[in-house]
Amino acid sequence: MLNKKERVKMEITQAIREAVEREISKGNWSENDFKNFLADFGVESVEDIDWRIEEVREKLMGKYMLFIEEIFPFEEWKYKGKKYYLLGTAQPAGRRDDHYIYKAHVEDDERNVWEVEWNTYPIDELKWLLEDELCDWGNPVRITLLEKWEGQKWNSKTN
């Protein structure tokens, strides 16, 4: 069974492959165009394209005009000068004293997976706030390494 991270990577890789195959089937690309496409990214297969890198996403959608909807949920988030990619939205995860807790999983440029935790503002101050205003999203209370990327696999740090 695939974990969430592996499933997401597989889905996005499949979406890129399908976008390329559509271009070939419509006659917009030849097999040679496909080889040049891979060479432009410095890879030998679609699976090797690192879609998390902003420049790669810009090239996919700009130069190659491939709109790959599955890439868009991966919003970039910076903290202490390091870039992370959200692997979904922050979700309520309980309560601590007079704050609610929100958590999300993110991935860094080295493909490590982290869990980020935020406290909301005090509960008695939340009444009129929208959900995107509940926390100081730029200042999490904790970032924990969950899985360290080791080449072709992740090494879970939660065991």
Image (spheres, grey):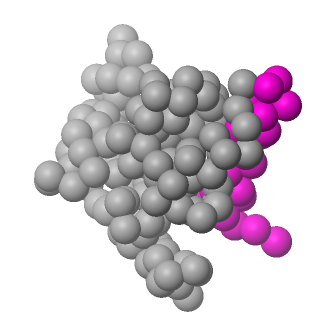
Q: In the depicted view, which residue is nearer to us: 158 or 135?
A: 158
Q: Main secondary structure of the magenta part?
A: helix
Q: Is residue 120 above or below residue 95?
A: above
Is residue 108 covered in magenta? no
What residue is at 82 percent from the left and 71 percent from the top?
1
On the picture, is 65 further left or further right than 9? left
> What residue range appears in magenta?
1-27
Residue 93, position in %: x, y?
A: 51, 50
Question: In the picture, residue 25 is in which quadrant?
Answer: top right
Residue 97, position in %: x, y?
A: 33, 50
Question: In the picture, residue 124 is in which quadrant?
Answer: top left
Q: In the depicted view, which residue is nearer to us: 157 or 140?
A: 157
What residue is at 33 percent from the left and 23 percent from the top?
133
Is residue 12 covered in magenta? yes
| Residue 117 in sight from this viewpoint | no
Residue 41, position in %: x, y?
A: 47, 52
On the picture, is 69 further left or further right than 79? right
Quadrant assignment for the C terminus: bottom right
What residue is at 39 percent from the left and 24 percent from the top?
132
